[in-house]
Image: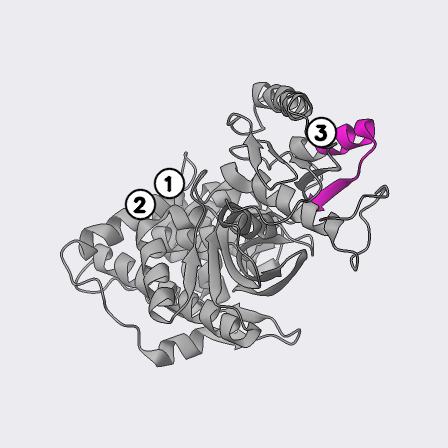
Amino acid sequence: MAPTRERPPVLACGAWLKNAACLLDARGEPAWSALHGDLGDPAACAALEASAQALLLQHAANGGAPVRAVAHDLHPDFFSTRFAVELAHTMGVPAIGVQHHHAHIAAVVAEHGLDGPVIGLALDGVGLGTDRTAWGGELLWLEGARWQRLGHLQPLALPGGDRAAREPWRMAASALHALGRGAEVVPRFAPVVGEATARGVQQMLDRGLNCPTTSSAGRWFDAAAAALGLSVRQTDEAQAAIALENAASRWLAQQAADRPLPGALVDLLTDTLPDGQRRLDVRGLFAALLDVPADGVDAAAARFHLALADALAHWAGEAARERGATTVCLGGGCFFNRVLRERVCTRLQAAGFSVHLPDRAGCGDAGLALGQAWVAAMQLCDPDLPNPPHAKETEPCV
């Protein structure tokens, strides 16, 4: 990381999955806790509490300036959020909530010491949005403490709520319904999940019952894997997406990987919503998977990856040109997918953009606390932004 100017030190408590805490000092240098794991485990929660106290003690022992805020995810039910609010109250400093995907991109900016505006692609399973819906396929603009959601992937319903993330076939059913082909849910999935279950999900989708929406890229990968018969239920995180990537990798290993996507398809994938946001509509890519081509599942998985990656790069590149940005940052767990990551990077670099990804902690939530801390510090330094709740007078940033 290349520190620029001194800012208020901030402690950040991370998110729910792969939790780790981070204390960002006045020089922009991060001190990390150990990786605690997922906060559904009481031992991980206790470890977070101990790590936060240890980071504060270490910072004070090194002569660091007083910590001015405690940053956390927007989700009110996360243990890390509740702990951060309680700790901030005890310390007499503000607790500052940072949107999940904003933090993903900010972590890249902080780690690489980037200045000026950047465009971010944040792709993962889920993170609570500022509109209280589940985000996960986000096009963002960042400059200093300012940020804006420029667009998102076509939303999908989650039939059964969180259960849909554990059963990829439900996401494929949702995508069928979004295509206006809901009548195909029962004949396609009854043989693998049972007719009663398939019919129940079709009825949920038809009636909009227990079907919250998400813009998650991870759920689109789940839908694609299920449509190709690669995953019906998953017991491990990203199991379906990994199966889809492995299928694509097998085919690409035997082919020339540089297969350009026709421009017309990219144009069809992108539209502008009434609020000005750009929606990347990938329903057409999903539809192409429903009838497996003669060259097989692996080829279909590869074409899905390449087409989606090219569309994402085009989407981000257009936004960057409009905003006068020359840098694109990639974050979120979907970028652990090597096929997706390399194709997006190649396309953006060929278009003349500088591309950055996280280095230290990888693309997932393990590095999220750095982005939370950086955003909170930048907010405290911006005199034109409203002070966070309960913020005290702070010294000017130098």
Determine whether 335 is above or below 58 in the image.
below
SS label for mark 3: helix
Q: Exactly how many numbered labels are in the figure?
A: 3
Badge 3 amino acid? Phe
Find out whether the residues at labels 1 and 3 contact each other: C-beta distance under 8 Å.
Answer: no
Whether residue 341 is situated above or below residue 50 in the rendered picture:
below
Residue occupied by mark 1? 239
| Residue 212 in view | no
Q: Classify 310 as above or below 159.
A: below
Rounded to the nearest angstrom, the CA distance separating label 1 from label 2 is 6 Å
- Label placed on residue 243: 2
Residue 267 x, y percent position in the rendering? 42, 79
Residue 93 among magenta residues:
yes
Question: Quarter of the image holding residue 286?
Answer: bottom left
Between 371 and 258, the residue placed more toward the observer is 371
Q: Residues within 10 Å of mark 2 (few under 14, many from 20)?
A: some
Q: Which residue is pictured at 60% across the width and 71% down the height?
A: 277
Q: CA distance from mark 3 to mark 2?
A: 36 Å
